[in-house]
Image (cartoon, helix red, strand yellow):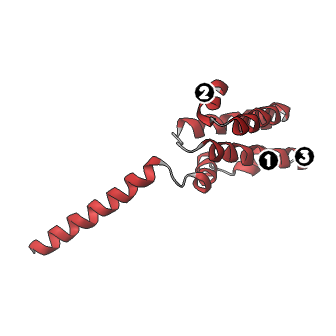
Amino acid sequence: MSAFIEKVVGDIGDKKRWREHEVRVRALPSGYRSAVEALERYLLRRGVIAKGDVLVDLHVELVEVFERAASQGTPVSEVVGGDPVHFADTLLGKYAAGEWIDEERRRLVSAIADAEAENGSRS
């Protein structure tokens, strides 16, 4: 997965930040590391398409959250809450602007409004 991310990340500065991020993840206690790795897998499978710096920022924030939790002894379950998917999607929401799906969402909303207008004009 790391080689794939480095390809996506692109820019040399972003690749450096990504490698630093990987080191930070490996330094986490095993349970926290496992949680971060699982969340990263989900986020990647979720299909996040973003510029390299945005992608790195997302993952850096994720590891920072778990570094704080580990240093304070906060259980993983308290970090992610009762719904890890909601946690991941909420985090992703902060970084998702500019995703390809945004344009599709706008198109859908517009198409529905147009369909409603057509329907309304025929009544």
* Residue pictured at 63% horizontal, 31% vertical: 5
Dot 1: what SS? helix
- Give 106 or 74, whichever is nearer the viewer: 106
Which tag, 3 or 1, sits closer to the chain's start?
Answer: 1
In the image, 75: left or right of 104? Answer: right
Q: Residue at x 54, y 55 (%)?
A: 97
Q: Is residue 69 above or below residue 121?
A: above
Q: Which residue is mark 1?
A: 64
Q: Position of residue 96 (x, y in %)?
A: 55, 52
Q: Position of residue 32 (x, y in %)?
A: 79, 38
For the residues labelled 1 and 2, the Cα–Cα distance comes to 22 Å
Identify residue for label 2: 4
In the image, farthest residue toward the front: 12
Please state which amino acid type lies under the numbered disc 1: Glu
Q: Quadrant of residue 50?
A: top right
Q: Is residue 16 above or below residue 92?
A: above
Residue 7 or residue 68, whichever sits in front: 7
Disc assigned to residue 85? none
Residue linked to disc 3: 71
* Relative depth, front residue between 79 and 48: 48
Q: Which quarter of the image is occupied by the C terminus? A: bottom left
**Mark 3 or 2, closer to the camera:** 2
Q: Is residue 122 above or below residue 90?
A: below
Residue type at mark 3: give it: Ser
Other residues around mark 1 within 10 Å, as few (<14) / some (14–19) / many (≥20): some
